[in-house]
Amino acid sequence: MPNFYEAVYAVVREIPRGRVMTYGQIATILGAPRAARAVGYAMRASGRKDDVPWQRVINGKGRISARTEVERPMLQKMLLEAEGVVFDAAETVDLAVLRWEPEHPERFYFAPSERVPL
């Protein structure tokens, strides 16, 4: 059985170019709705995995979370814009348009009995 981070990466690998998901949305799909922060930690750790499009995960307000080094949020915005994601003057994306929902989210469900890293 995969660990929580690998379950997060499985969801993120499915997000199409030009679309986004939120940390909380991913946590909810995995069956751990209170683990949005753990999803963020997984995204931070994903820098070592070239096949995880970490830039496609943003916060629930439609913004890039800037809790890391200065360069990473700038890189994230640049990568998203290269995929066609448009930010408004407030540096926000329109989640009503760009938020991606997997067709069968139940296939990503992570056993709640597994400990989620917080």
Image (cartoon, grey):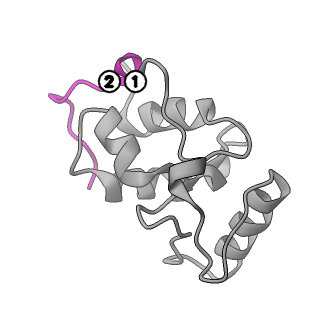
- In terms of depth relative to the viewer, which is nearer, 21 or 13? 21
Can you say which quadrant of the picture contains the C terminus?
Answer: bottom left
Is the residue marked by circle 1 packed among few (<14), some (14-19), or many (20+) residues within 10 Å? few
Work out whether 78 lies above or below 41: below
Residue 36 quadrant? bottom left
Does the magenta segment cover residue 28? no
- In terms of depth relative to the viewer, which is nearer, 32 or 47? 32
Residue range (magenta): 105-118
SS assignment for the magenta stretch, majority: loop
Query: Furthest residue to the front?
Result: 96
Q: Could you tell me which residue is drawn at 66 percent across and 75 percent down?
A: 88
Which numbered tag is attached to residue 109?
A: 2
Which numbered tag is attached to residue 114?
A: none
- In terms of depth relative to the viewer, which is nearer, 114 or 15? 15
Gap between marks 2 and 1 measured at Cα: 7 Å
**Residue 62 at x, y percent in the picture:** 51, 64
Q: What amino acid type should be assigned to the residue bearing mark 2?
A: Tyr
- In terms of depth relative to the viewer, which is nearer, 77 or 101? 101
Mark 1, residue position? 105
Q: Are marks 2 and 1 in contact (CB under 8 Å)?
A: yes
Q: Could you tell me which residue is drawn at 66 percent across and 49 percent down?
A: 48
Q: What amino acid type should be assigned to the residue bearing mark 1?
A: Pro
